Amino acid sequence: MATNVTRTLTDLGDGLFAYIQGDGSWGWSNSGLVVSEGESLLVDTLFTGRLTRDMLDAYRRAAPEAETIDILVNTHANGDHTFGNALAGDARIIGSTACAEEMEERPAEVFAEMVRNWRNHGEIGAFLHETMGVRFDFSDVVHRPPTELFNGHKTIEVGGRTVELVELGPAHTRGDIVVHIPDAKTVFTGDILFSGGHPIIWAGPIDNWIKACDLILDWDIETVVPGHGPVGTKAELRHMRDYLIHTRNEATIRYEAGMSWEDAAWDIAFDQFDSWLDRERVVANVASIYRDLSHGRIAPPRPEIMRQMLRYRRGATCPHDEPCSCGAHGGGK
């Protein structure tokens, strides 16, 4: 497992901390900690047991209250935010109903088996191997889903401090929530925000994600901790909103012109987001938008989406197998 990625604990002040992993690319997610009057709340665990233990050790060195985690909140079901849950001891684990349902669809041990035996799992296995399997050791992951479920909104107390859990999915996944600490003017967004990286729409619709950005931007907040990438402010969230609107509008133009979803993914230019990581995710995003625009008539299966993401990632000049005479070479990329 690559452990040379820079992992940084940031003291946000007023009993809040963020644990930031590298540049936030595939699997390198963030977590958060809230402490008050001897109690603690952890926002998300990490992709493996080893990474989660390192993170918990860092929190304990920074805040004695983290010696015992009282509450763990999972912002969504993806393994890079949940596979370390078993290390939270006897903590209450809170998540949305949809988050828990998604976790049951592919438990941690099943994911680990797919990565270990990736050659037996077709395009999905190849994708998992190339983007994550070569970087992480999943031999120590354990399935432990949330035990307290909610829908919509939930208010909890941490050492007399109010913490608001707000469900904003389906967007990135079916069960996205954010963790809002009003008195600290801080929000932990989970993967509603990828800072400096292309987001990926596993669920959608994209309009829900845009609405989620709008809602958070209306809050009185100063600090925004993304699911991936560095700590920031509302500025990064506005940039994410701009990205989503750009992708939706450009994909819609191509859909209405009769262009295939694959060709549209290669054709859309992202000049103002040129420095963002993991550009291959545009393939999944355009596929999601086409599915919604066509009311499900165009619904690319997950293996095909992953196959095309790998082609994009590897620098293919169009979505078609060689030899190709589509004339689309050198488009938006």
Image (cartoon, rainbow, N blue to C red):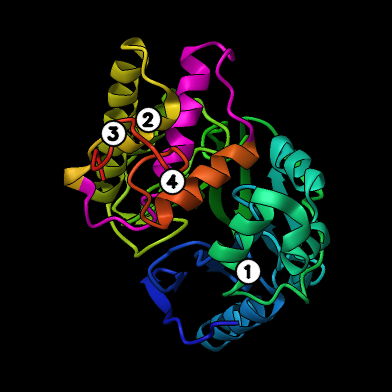
In the picture, the disc for residue 281 is: 4
The residue located at (42%, 39%) in the rendering is 319
What residue sits right under mark 3 in the picture? 328
Task: Classify 10 Å Cα crowding around label 3: few (below 14), some (14-19), many (20 and above).
Answer: some
What residue sits right under mark 2 in the picture? 263
The residue located at (80%, 54%) in the rendering is 107
Q: Could you tell which of marks 2 and 1 lies nearer the N-terminus?
A: 1
What residue sits right under mark 1 in the picture? 133
Figure check: 204 above or below 173:
above
Residue type highlighted by circle 4: Arg
Q: Nearer the viewer, residue 254 or 320?
A: 320
Task: Classify 10 Å Cα crowding around label 1: few (below 14), some (14-19), many (20 and above).
Answer: many
Depth-wise, is mark 2 or mark 1 nearer the camera?
A: 2
Q: Which residues are magenta?
A: 273-301
Q: Are marks 1 and 3 in contact (CB under 8 Å)?
A: no
What's the distance in space between the residues labelled 3 and 2, CA to CA? 7 Å
Q: Are marks 3 and 2 in contact (CB under 8 Å)?
A: yes
